[in-house]
Image (tube, rainbow, N blue to C red):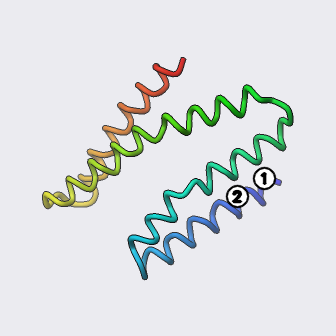
Amino acid sequence: MFLLKLAVANLIIIACVLLGRRVPPLGGLIATMPLISLIVLAWLATDRPGDGALITGYLKGVLWGLVPTGVFFGAAYLCLRKGMGLPAALGVGGVLWLGGAFLHQWLLR
């Protein structure tokens, strides 16, 4: 089962990369779709059937995790627009995401 989960996740990532090369905005849209989140939700539900607290906790984390993720992409986008190189822009976005992730975890306790 683990190998199936690994294969599905990798196929989605590869599809986004291939599509992103041809139509970057569409590749980005598909990459942000809740495909992985839905797959994880389904696997959690099958691994621990009837565990409503697990599912609602997971969904709460996904919902509030959108905020630091949005900060990451917004910061990286703005840095790139200002002429910053990709590694530096991803670094700035990553640091801001990490701060948001720590805040996310602290607030959801």
Using the image, determine if residue 2 lies above or below residue 44: below
Badge 2: few (under 14), some or many (20 or more) residues near its Cα, within 10 Å?
Answer: few
- Amino acid beneath label 1: Phe
Pick whichever, 87 or 11, lies toward us.
11
In depth, the one of 91 and 48 nearer the eye is 48
Quadrant position of residue 62: top right
Residue shown at 38%/35% (left/top)? Answer: 98
> Going by the image, does 34 lie left or right of 74?
right
Q: Which residue is identified by label 2?
A: 6
Are discs 1 and 2 less than 8 Å apart at CB? yes
Which of the 4 quarters of the picture holds residue 97? top left
What residue sits 42% from the left and 27% below the top? 102
Q: Which residue is mark 1?
A: 2
Q: Residue furthest top?
A: 109
Crowding around mark 1 (Cα neighbors within 10 Å: few <14, some 14 to 19, many 20+) is few
Q: Residue furthest left?
A: 82
Residue 95 x %, y %: 32, 39
